[in-house]
Amino acid sequence: MTSVSRDCQLLAYAAVAFVLVACAGRPARQGRGETVFLDELAVRPTAKRSAVAGPFSASRTVALAKPCQLVDVRTVVPGISMDLRYGTAANVTGRPLYPAGMPCLLHRDTAAKLQNAQSMLRSQGYGLRIWDGYRPPEVQQALYQAGAATRMFLSPENAGWSRHCGGIAVDATLVDAEGREQRMPTAFDAGLHHASSTYRGGDPVIARNLQILHQAMKQAGFEPAAAEWWHFDDGDYVRNPQPVVFGHELGIPSP
Ligand SMILES: [Zn+2]
């Protein structure tokens, strides 16, 4: 190795260390006296992978995701209920942001925790319905552009990318054994009003449903977001940021 290339390598290591330390040290965002979001702190990838062209194919995306530690949730948690809402028009943009057949991807460790939560809920006659998992940064940008006023989607430029963009966060609700959604404080992405993980309404059924969901997720190793009852971060990565993976690296078209 020449001294020039050795110097380049040392510089690269120093840059990576700086990015990791800087991001790990970023405090949780505060707003109006409360923690608004735990939903940031994924970091940009240090090595840029190139864009993958051609029509979308779910199996190709799953194959491309594997080296990024992202796995198809259905292979880890067979039979889990899925309703990827950003694949439908039922989101703040009013149009589908995912291609038809978009697989739900998560970091393999996060998917394993989800499998544990699902097992615990199954033993009680319940199960999970997944509303979102890995979310391409391109989709996060579209959600921010359309939904910034809701305060549910913060500026990637100012606040950093969502942990969804690293595949270490999941949005989920509770279903019964027949797959019927159980009553919860609010609908998905219905704004932050009444969406707190600390339920203050007076409906004992909703309070119980929320407690069942959160208890299983916490026991499995997730940390619920304070401001969104449906959002859960993988507890092992909350202070251990993972690289974001861009959709174009996985052959997922931009919305
Ligand atoms: Zn979320």
Image: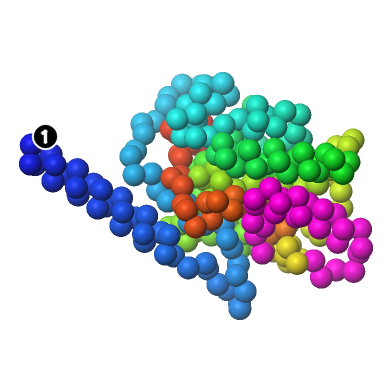
Residue 234, given in percent of the width and then of the height, sits at 59, 50
Q: Residue 176 vs residue 101: left or right?
A: right
Residue at the farthest bottom position: 33
Q: Quadrant of residue 131?
A: top right
Residue lying at 90% horizontally and 69% vertically, measured from the top left: 202
Residue at the farthest left position: 3
Q: Quadrant of residue 78?
A: top right
Q: In this view, does 193 lie above or below 210?
A: below
Q: Is residue 128 above or below residue 202?
A: above
Q: Residue 116 vs residue 39: left or right?
A: right
Q: What stretch is highlighted in magenta?
A: 199-226
Name the residue beneath numbered marker 1.
1
Residue lying at 36% horizontally and 31% vertically, measured from the top left: 50
Q: What residue type is labelled 1?
A: Met
Q: In which quarter of the image is the C terminus?
A: top right
Residue 171, given in percent of the width and then of the height, sits at 67, 48
Q: Residue 104 vs residue 178: left or right?
A: left
- Give the mark count: 1
